Image (cartoon, grey):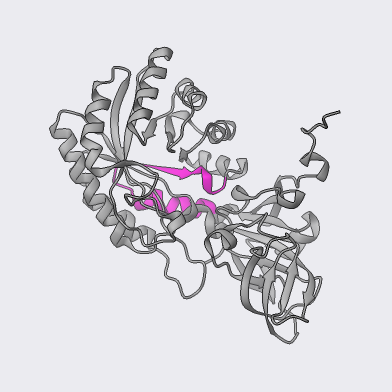
Amino acid sequence: MSAVHRREGELWMEGVRLAEVAARFGTPCYVYSRAAIEGAWRAFDEGLAGTDHLVCYAVKANANLAVLALLARLGSGFDIVSGGELARVLAAGGRADRVIFSGVGKSEAEIRAALAAGIRCFNVESEPELERLDRLAGEAGVRAPVSLRVNPDVDAGTHPYISTGLKGNKFGIAHDRALAAYDLAARLPNLRVTGIDCHIGSQILDMAPLEEALERVLELAAAVAARGVPITHVDVGGGLGIRYREEETALDIGRWCAAVGRRLAGTGYAVVVEPGRAIVGNAGVLLTRVEYLKLDKDRRFAIVDASMSELIRPALYEAWHEIAPLAALDRPEAVYDVVGPVCESSDVLGTDRRLAIAAGDGLAILSAGAYGMAMASNYNSRPRPAEVMVDGARAAEVRARETIASLFAGESTLG
């Protein structure tokens, strides 16, 4: 489930003891496994062997340059949703011709930067975006490659905040308007239609909604082709879920890839996939330390130095992360709510956790490689944590901890 394992009572990641990482780099601290990231990406690439494909890592899950550089060296593509993510990909050695630009609100500046870089495709989400892209491509003297993100109205069965494929979601073009949108794209002189795209949500653990969405997209692709609009690729999106706790069953990546390959066989379409969490989620942990045990309330609280500022998923999505001591010590167990120091009642990292801990102990919050540091903030003027990459027996800092002074370095008083 996670990139860590316990050896002689202590948690390790690859060949590194996590207690040593905490001592060297401090807490809170994010730690990622190179082997786990590369292995997860290869599972997609090898699973689609025999099918013309491109695995595009969803940068929003974890945008650290070290993560992006690892994947770029493997030949990964990248799914981006902002100009900042494009700049990160290019800085990390990613190829622009393997970049897919998604997102509902691309600005003119972002589109111009992507056109200048020569990205592979824009995943367009509305008719006004088609018109804006056509105008800007014309000004740049190029034809912009486009794929339309179609909302297939398929329920992914996930938390409402991470569901993206229903009629009421802001994403994509409604299925019943898609043919008209493709007609518009084909008429605009500075656009070149290349594909069709869908993405129905995140943390999906059941293949059924993914298969239903793919069927609806392929039916629409055939209808578009019948109107004389060529489509060369089908982008099936991402959203494939991981195991956060022992009782969950993760989506079988190999089985899903094989099903996609079989369904696309003979269609002539290349396939694009956009996994994010499935590549980095279980490759990362957040290290933290117990500051106090508060035992005089109706519930026991373990107050730690990590918070919703570093890991907002539990507060935002009611997400569950396993919390494990860095060292298994001979102490009596008790049930705790693990909470942070931020001044919000929602600053809870885990409830009803049975732990044998004392003040000063180190803890690891597991499966925190996706949407952890990427969503971290400076709320309560807290510096964001360091990030560390483990490679075999080596641990390297890949992002320094912010300093308090850096939090207001760009500010000034009225004078």
Looking at the picture, how far across and down is residue 218, in whole percent? 21, 45
229 left or right of 368 in image: left
The quarter of the picture where residue 291 lies is: bottom right
Residue 317 on image: x %, y %? 52, 61
Identity of the residue furthest to the right in this view? 415
Is residue 350 rendered to the left or right of residue 327? left
> Where is residue 150 shown, x and y percent of the image?
30, 42
Identify which residue is drawn at 41% across, 46% down: 274
Quick one: which residue is furthest to the bottom in this view? Answer: 332
> In the drawing, does residue 315 fall left or right of residue 234?
right
Magenta region, residue range: 37-62
Position of residue 171 relative to residue 111, above or below, is below
Q: Quadrant of the C terminus?
A: top right
Tell me where residue 9 appears, x and y as whole percent: 69, 77
Q: Return the residue found at the far front.
A: 414
Q: Residue at x 44, y 34 (%)?
A: 99
Q: Nearer the viewer, residue 369 or 353?
A: 353
Can see residue 165? yes
Q: How many marks?
A: 0
Above or below 325: residue 163? above
State whether residue 385 appears in this view. no
